[in-house]
Amino acid sequence: MEFSPGATVLAAGNGFGKSALIKSLYDTFGADPHRIDESWRKAHAISAVDFEVAGKAYTAMKIAGTYMVFDATGQKILQTTSVTRELSPFMADLLDFRLLMTDKREQVLIPPPAYAFAPFCIDQDKSWSEPWKPFRGMYLPNSAASLAEYHSGLKPNAYYVARAERDRLAVEL
């Protein structure tokens, strides 16, 4: 399906796959939706999304738990099954997403891609009952407050980089 540069409207009755399509887009980037229709999961869909960042073209793919990113020439620049260790840092660099958070073990880390996409996904499964949690795996402490401050621009990238360094040094001391 091709989306226009402006707004694209998906209109159909219940059960036609509108939500499955949108959730698959996020899933391709490592943001695991709370619920995808069982028939969609059983289909073992392969997803590919062509996108641009700062005028550069990329293609993201997900095949059976493996994430890949290709550049405009088709050269593979990432292949991984690890969202936390490999996909998260890659996507953070690509999107200039500098939010750093401290986990329950006091380790500073780059949050999963779900944190970058959280304000852009409101689904009927979880978003109404748990704001700032449209995806699985949003486990970090103070997620809602950090996401609201980051995505609203109240605290810029530099703030989170400095805070993460402060937290890392505190643990070291």
Image (cartoon, rainbow, N blue to C red):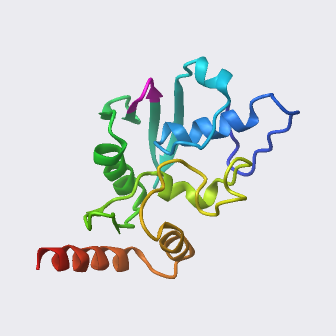
Report the magenta residues as a range.
Answer: 62-67
* Horizontal and vertical percent position of residue 166: 23, 80
Residue 61 to residue 124: above or below: above
The quadrant holding residue 169 is bottom left
* Horizontal and vertical percent position of residue 60: 45, 36
Position of the N terminus by quadrant = top right
Residue at the extreme right of the image, as rendered: 13
Position of the C terminus by quadrant = bottom left
Please tell me which residue is depicted at 52% across the width and 30% down the height of the picture. Answer: 48
Magenta segment includes 23: no
Please tell me which residue is depicted at 52% across the width and 47% down the height of the picture. Answer: 136
Please tell me which residue is depicted at 59% across the width and 35% down the height of the picture. Answer: 24
Magenta segment includes 66: yes
* Horizontal and vertical percent position of residue 6: 72, 51
Q: Which one is in front, 22 or 102?
A: 102
Q: Main secondary structure of the magenta part?
A: strand
Q: Which one is in front, 22 or 48?
A: 22
Residue 61 to residue 152: above or below: above
